[in-house]
Amino acid sequence: MTEPELTRDAFLDGRVLAWQPRHGYRAATDPVFLAASVPAQAGQNVLELGCGVGVASLCLAARVPGLVLTGIELQADYAALARRNGAENGVAFDVVEGDLQALPPALRARRFDHVIANPPYYAPQGPAAQNAGRDRALREDTPLAIWIDTALRRTRDGGYITLIHLAERLPDLLAGFAGRASCYVLPLAARAHRPARRVIVQARKGARAPFKLLPPLVIHQGEAHLGDGDFFTDTARALLRDGAALDLREMAQA
């Protein structure tokens, strides 16, 4: 992609700067919420499936320095941007171009402390987006069950898988982890008293703890936007602007 086809966007109040296609799939708040919820510690290794331009991994690195980060991305243009974004943010980010259904041997031989993903949200039979890159990123081609199976296979015993997805896909997400991991689910609601549209699912491989449905995280204050501001709640602003952590394990013990 040429420079006029790109924008350079700020995340975490500018702690992360990422080049993105001007008209393709564009990262917004979802990868930031995803990164905030990963309970990684310095020295651990993290694999991001379908990393796009790398925003989730780079936001995680901004909060937890010293991680060993790897990403796999199917689309060559996005993989190249993820490498560029890693380099320009001073983060060692090993981005592999490839299909998660046919991982390169070097990745198949590894196990990770954490696997994270923001899988495509929409059904394969839905209407196609006009931009091919956006369509590939948002419309499910590889079944969700394969995303989950790949994540489990690449995670060490006792390691964590953290995903963000549509709330309507929660039954499929839980079915994929059934008998293989214990799960916490955090609903994300745009406003109080509204149904959650998205969920963060965190699974611990091999664990047998009871399923926990956590209280929803409300993103915006009030019933509607009253101006040009973002009107985030204090909690959402701390996550999206200040790089705060979202510890689902701690929430489950409250």
Image: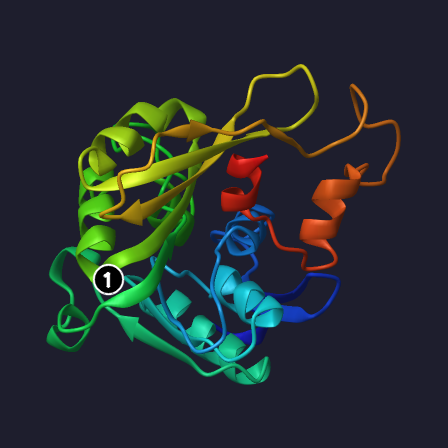
Question: Does residue 32 appear left or right of residue 235 in this picture?
Answer: left
Is 16 above or below relative to 194? below
* Picture coordinates of residue 239, whole percent (x, y): 67, 51
Please state, as top left, top right, bottom left or bottom right, where the C terminus lies in the image.
top right
Residue 245 appears anywhere in the view: yes
Most extreme residue toward the right is 227
> Where, by quadrant of the figure, is residue 169 drawn?
top left
* Picture coordinates of residue 243, whole percent (x, y): 68, 59
Residue found at x 56% / y 77%: 65
Nearer the observer, 219 or 26: 219
Question: Does residue 103 appear left or right of residue 30 in this picture?
Answer: left
* Picture coordinates of residue 151, whole percent (x, y): 25, 53
Residue found at x 79% / y 41%: 234
Residue 140 appears anywhere in the view: no
Nearer the observer, 213 or 125: 213
Kind of residue sitting beneath label 1: Arg
Question: How packed is label 1: few (under 14 Cα within 10 Å), some, or many (20 or more)?
Answer: some
* Picture coordinates of residue 87, whole percent (x, y): 52, 84
Question: Does residue 43 appear left or right of residue 111 in this picture?
Answer: right
Which residue is tagged 1? Answer: 156
Question: Does residue 72 appear left or right of residue 146 in this picture?
Answer: right
